[in-house]
Amino acid sequence: MENLDSPISNLFLIGAGFTKAVFPEAPLNNDLLEKLIKYHENKNIPTPLKKYKQEYKTDDIEIILTKLDLEIAGSRPNTTRNLTNDRITIERHIAAHFMLFSFNEEVFSKNKWLSDFAKLFSNNDAIVSLNYDCFLEGLLDYSEIWDPTGYVNIANPLFRPKTPNPKNILVYKIHGSSNFRISSAILREKGQKVIILIINDVFFPRSGKYTGFGDSNKTPLYIIAPSFVKIPHVQIADMINKAIKVTPYAKNMVIGGCSLRPEDNSVQLIITSFIKKELPTTKNLIIIDPDANHIKNRIESYWAGSTQNLNIHPIPKTFQDGIEELLDKLNNCEHKN
């Protein structure tokens, strides 16, 4: 199980731009709808997304799911049941689709920059991942610097490594994950089901070898779909609280491949926790993204008056083009602390 007692070193906020750097075909938020529809059409799997795209007259999956959530909230029981079933189906389709972007050695060998990327992480670092896919965790597992016991709040009781999470790197997947599954086990107190972890070699090439813990199609995968209405399972809500609690003690923060969408309140709270904590030392925020300068301006505007003791270092590049500069910046920041 994760160890939350050690002081946090560096905090990483990783978004879809990381997966996009590894898999050029991976969808970003603005093209997720079309890619999901096309994928399921090619597989001859019916998806409610096509119906709602036509009904709501939009190509934005976030708008579709927000309108669907509002319609569910205001409908009669019989109608609500059908709408909710569609909503659940869409979530399952999204989660299953992102399994395609899991770690494999062939992809690793083709992307030489990934070896340097793994060098970013050291003892007691924390990673807040906004991604549904598990490529990042697979890379860390393959690099032997992390294992699935490093997930915060999500575990599988059958997985018990001899030396759990050797560097105490913690991973907070606050939007759920394609390897999170709603367990058929029910908590006695309130009747609420729990989220457990799937551990196999699809997600974890080292730790998951010869295992299939939690790998069952009988229970649904768990993600928080892209909607303006986000109501997390209690385990995810507590995970977010823990991320906010440890964030102030990070020496440095790296935001990578994340556009900081304003509707993602949890991300705003985590960044606020990093920036607003009054500590005697100056903090460093590194942004790696092709749009890094614009993101820097938005941060300075939103947190106006709170960035005097914050050094912001934009790297307006993709991960693959900017990884060496990112390593240099982070190393320099650590030496100055």
Image: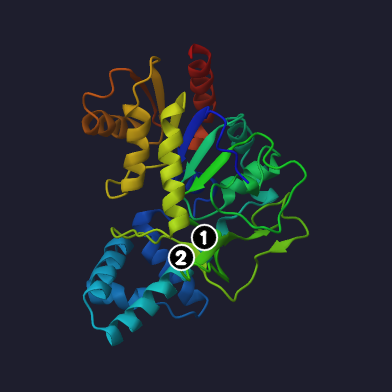
Which is more toward the observer, 39 or 72? 72
The answer to whether any part of residue 313 appears in the image is yes
Could you tell me residue 253's position as x and y percent? Answer: 44, 29
User: Which element is circle 2 on?
Assistant: helix
Could you tell me residue 78's position as x and y percent? Answer: 29, 87
Please tell me in which quadrant of the rendered image residue 125 appears: top right
In the image, farthest residue toward the bottom: 78
92 horizontally vs 196: left or right: left
Which residue type carries mark 1?
Phe
Q: Residue at x 63, y 61 (%)?
A: 198
Please tell me in which quadrant of the rendered image residue 216 appears: bottom right
Which residue type carries mark 2?
Ile
246 horizontally vs 158: left or right: left
User: Which element is circle 1 on?
Assistant: helix
317 horizontally vs 119: left or right: left
In the image, farthest residue toward the front: 189
Which is more toward the observer, 328 or 290? 328
Please give the residue where the numbered disc 1 appears in the rendered image: 98
Please give the residue where the numbered disc 2 appears in the rendered image: 94
Measured in 3D between alpha carbons, the distance from the residue under mark 2 to the one under mark 1, in whole angstroms, is: 7 Å
The answer to whether any part of residue 130 appears in the image is no
Q: Residue at x 36, y 73 (%)?
A: 49
Could you tell me residue 214's position as x and y percent? Answer: 65, 65
